Amino acid sequence: MNSQKKLEQFIQHGYKDYLPNVSIDCTIFGYHDRKLKVLLLNWKTPEGWSLPGGRVKRNESLQLSASRILSERTGLEEIFLNQFHTFGDSVFRQQRFKHTKALSKFNVDFGEDNWLLDRTLSIGFYALVDYSLVNPQPDLFTEECRWWDIYDVPGLLFDHNEMIEKALATLRHQMYYEPIGYNLLPEKFTLPEIHDLYETILEKTLDRRNFPKKLISLGIIKKLKERKNIGPHRAPFLYRFDKRNYDKALKDGLSLSF
Amino acid sequence: MNSQKKLEQFIQHGYKDYLPNVSIDCTIFGYHDRKLKVLLLNWKTPEGWSLPGGRVKRNESLQLSASRILSERTGLEEIFLNQFHTFGDSVFRQQRFKHTKALSKFNVDFGEDNWLLDRTLSIGFYALVDYSLVNPQPDLFTEECRWWDIYDVPGLLFDHNEMIEKALATLRHQMYYEPIGYNLLPEKFTLPEIHDLYETILEKTLDRRNFPKKLISLGIIKKLKERKNIGPHRAPFLYRFDKRNYDKALKDGLSLSF
């Protein structure tokens, strides 16, 4: 099936395979080398950028649905997505999509009462990945998929700016009590590497001494005997996460306050 | 309209007023005098207990929908409900409701492909209220609504045991970083009162000295000059929450670890 045929099939008959009135939108944060980005898609019509999203198959779990959407847009597999909030209150979600003119550009007959134009709740997921590993792919409705610096995000379609804001707040909050940046660091890392990661995501300056001291005193990271050679006379010690201590600390009511 | 007529109307034509494939379920925790309870409904058929729940009106925000359900079951108004998770992965939610026999007891013709029997995602909300103020009310599908001790909850319909577990974990987590028990204490309270509240909900023993010391040193509660007379020679000082300091502390990365 070519992509125009696929689009037509989805618009006209998709409700047989997908749940109506519900979508999933993914805020995919990308981190690399002290930069935080977010993955956005440029719509063919209506014009504008949005988060990657999709519909839930009738026989698919929500988690699987979100993973499928992430993998279709990024090529990444087995990335953990956190469900964080279901959106349904914004005025954009109360009313039928008003872009009838814009929709005509798809060259597909939507018919009356099309399932895609009814009020849609959106279940928000977020993930944090290494953006240098990603090859972004647009979907049927969009013509471009790329990373935007988190501080340059344009006005988005629907309520997607609100979604990013809430996803970012959740991510920052979780940095304090879950090893959320875990998969962004090599198994063995230096203190400046974990320090940079936390500073970039939390967007605040963390004390060079107290930040690692806290992590070490809670037993969350462990100093190894190995060092990393990064230059002449520069060989900082390597560290690794202690997942078991992290989990124990969490249970007892862990809290990092930097 | 009598209640049988209302039930028939809802089952046969409800999809015109409510979104299909989505419901809201509320885990309503009740606290009073060192006891933690949860509000449950006993179904006429299929037999069993469940959380209070309902459907989202087509023109209603999710928050309003949850408040309406809470208020219909408890008579309480203006209680803040936290959305915490959307459930859709359990096998109970994958398949059509299988209790055709049980449903016949409602004496309503469901017809083929009834909207209520299709796969339903559920948006979970939780609230914490003073159960001594509540007058529980069953709904159209149920014959009894009452409080259960949190440690005596029976096997529930659908995936509602899982919902309570996740709601409780969320509540406990939030106790560490939001003044969630706020509305359960009088405006001015004694240290034993707030201590009892936190101990009961967190289900752990908190140090009589360190617990309030931490709250005071963070500026979250403030000692007043007044005392409460609770008996001869017993007049402990009163305290109140300092919401502004709480909010500030939160922003800076507050964390209570008792």
Image: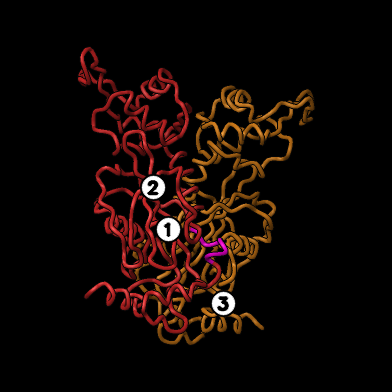
Chain colours: A red, B orange
> What amino acid does circle 3 point to?
Asp
> What amino acid does circle 1 point to?
Trp
Check if mark 1 and mark 2 are on a common chain.
yes
Q: Is residue B164 visible?
A: no
Check if mark 1 and mark 3 are on a common chain.
no
Q: Nearer the viewer, mark 3 or mark 2?
A: 2
- Element marked by disc 2: strand
Q: Chain of mark 2?
A: A
- Element marked by disc 3: loop
> What amino acid does circle 2 point to?
Trp
Q: Nearer the viewer, residue B14 or A193?
A: A193
- Element marked by disc 1: strand
For residue A148, the mark is: 2
- Residue B228 at x, y percent in the picture: 77, 30
Range of magenta residues: A87-93
Q: Nearer the viewer, residue B196 or A242?
A: A242
In three-dimensional space, the C-alpha distance between marks 1 and 2, rounded to whole angstroms, equals 11 Å
- Give the mark, 1 or 2, whose residue is nearer the N terminus: 1
State left or right for residue A38 relative to residue B240.
left
- Residue A134 at x, y percent in the picture: 26, 48
Question: Which residue carries the number 3 mark?
Answer: B17
Q: Nearer the viewer, residue B139 or B59?
A: B59
Give neighbour class at mark 1: few <14, some 14-19, many 20+ (Cα, 10 Å).
Answer: many
In three-dimensional space, the C-alpha distance between marks 3 and 2, rounded to whole angstroms, equals 40 Å
Magenta includes B99?
no
Q: Residue at x 37, y 27 (%)?
A: A195
- Residue A69 at x, y percent in the picture: 32, 59
Question: Which residue carries the number 1 mark?
Answer: A49
- Residue A59 at x, y percent in the picture: 31, 69
State left or right for residue B248 relative to residue A233.
right
Q: Is residue B125 visible?
A: yes
